[in-house]
Image: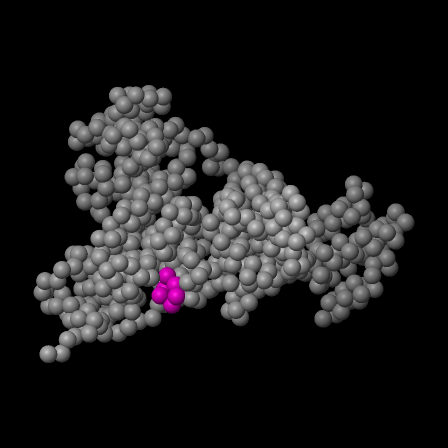
Amino acid sequence: MKIASGFEQHVNEIRTAADGGFIPRDPEVVKSWLRCLNDYKLDPEHKGEARILPESVLKEHKQEAEDLLSIARFGMEDLYRRVNSMGYVLLLTDRKGVTVDFIGDEKVDRELKRAGLYIGAEWSERNAGTCGVGACLTSGEAIVVHQTDHFDMAHTPLSCTSAPIYDVKGSLIGVLDVSLLMSPAEKHSQALTLEVVKSCVRRIEMAYLLGTRKGDWILRLNRTSEFLGVDPSCALSVATDGTISGLTHGAHRMFSSVLNEDWRKTSFVGRPFEDLFAVDYNDLPCLLNAVTPGEQALETRDGKILFADVRAPVRLPSRSAPPTLPKALTRIHGGDPALAAVVEKAARIVDKQISIILEGETGVGKEFVAQALHEARKKQGAFVAINCAALPEALIESELFGYVANSFTGANSKGKKGLIEQANGGTLFLDEIGDMPLVLQARLLRVLAEREVMPVGATKPIQVDIRVIAASHRNLKDMVDAGLFRQDLYYRLNGVVLGLPALRNRKDKSWLIGRVGKKVAGETSMRFTKEALEVLCGYAWPGNIREMINVFELCHALSDGGPIGVGDLPENLVGGFERLSSS
């Protein structure tokens, strides 16, 4: 008697489910199999490879999920610290199933990418068949898809535990997934993991609500009073007109039950506070200073008791007034549209712990912009700039990470604090990051992932809290494709990309000429004739702002204090202007 292979058994089991036969699987898994067969017309005998989206498409998905990325990141890093020793990989996907962030072990980087447990992987049911992310997005429920629960045989070694993330209006906006390349055969081994992932998602949704509804009343809720102030189960926000303005998903489901409504078809945003509670909205201020369980108790419409930690609205600036830009960012340009867009985008993320890449030609002022981004932050600390191209390769490791006393021949007897540790609490600016050796890229990646640095010769890591801004005149994505720059580090740094225009393309050259002239000559600034200004504004400036500074320093040194004319300018600059004009 021929014994069917594992592949044949898997296909036969899916066909049995399609014929209505009983199989010992979770109902949500069976429903997903049927969707794969009937709705997406997927072939159970086809072994599909993981689909990784091109960088240009991934960039669009990341931009659309920018708010989710910034809020979820801290929760993901905290979760990874607790589960990384067990081999788990964390994926954050958007509402379409595209992985917009991930944290994994770089030691198995190649295996993760091959399996699709990587940034840019697309895990929708339509593309990947039954999988944790796809089934979670379709059902709206947390789920474990373990090994042969997967529809596609190529994914059956994996175990995927996924939980949906909802926004404050009740819309599903993403999925947090924790996966294993290889796992124990028993599905119940992931039961605790499922609860940990759901707990992390609950905190992410809570942070989302608190961050986006600061101008409203916030009620953090729990069925018991003991953990109310420490770990509430859900929360909702109430606008100043007494209507519900937002909820976490836990609150959405709980109040759907209170009103005996289907949570999938119910919307609470815009409904009166009194629809949910047997309490008048105007009585909320009485709960502000409540400390005893009796004072914190609220009765719901179905007679149940909830305990509430109430926060008053934060007074926000008038919506009619344009947002005020941090002063440091207003000094970046003098009306150039491209830089104005950069400043507007930067202002949105300046106080968020998102890594930034500054793109632009040599000399466009990347370090100046990085310094402005640092100064614009509410959280102050040191600004440490590192030119990765200027550090000798033999010294770069000890300079970046520091070293303990007598850790190598010639080391200081007292040890030395590294540049990364010096930036603790502030900003680490990595200029010309593309010139960093690959072996040190791996160590930097671990610093960014673990938020800790290991000095040379040390046995215990040092915790660091840094905001990283990286810059390079080289195209880092092209370097990744050529194998010259680590892909995982690129995606770790690539939180937001700010492109700085070349000087020849800027529309605020006159303003910049004044700023650079003042920088070179001090308060007296520098005066140019009308003809000289025309040449300066029309020149192509291949060396960008750095070249302008050098030219102005020469002019200032040779001037007699009067206006600088065309004859006082370098010949190559005047000739360059003439060629540009004639063309």
Quarter of the image that includes the N terminus: bottom left
- Residue 436 lies, in percent from the top left, at 59, 60
- Residue 290 lies, in percent from the top left, at 33, 21
Choose between 342 and 164: the one closer to the eye: 164
Quick check: 86 left or right of 22? right
Residue 112 sits inside the magenta stretch: yes
* Residue drawn 56% across the image and 42% down it: 424
Residue 556 in sight here: yes
Q: Is 167 drawn above or below residue 153 in the view shown?
A: above
Choose between 151 and 300: the one closer to the eye: 151
Q: Main secondary structure of the magenta part?
A: helix
* Residue drawn 57% across the image and 64% down it: 475
- Residue 350 lies, in percent from the top left, at 53, 44
Q: Is 77 drawn above or below residue 442 in the view shown?
A: above
Residue 68 in sight here: no
Q: Residue furthest right?
A: 560
Quadrant for residue 302, please give it.
top left
Q: Is 283 drawn above or below residue 135 in the view shown?
A: above
Q: Residue furthest left?
A: 21
- Residue 492 lies, in percent from the top left, at 48, 55
What is the magenta range?
Answer: 111-117
Quarter of the image that includes the C terminus: bottom right
Choose between 152 and 316: the one closer to the eye: 152
* Residue drawn 22% across the image and 72% down it: 7
Q: Residue furthest bottom?
A: 1
What colour scheme does the image use? one colour
Quadrant for residue 13, please give it.
bottom left
* Residue drawn 67% across the image and 47% down it: 412
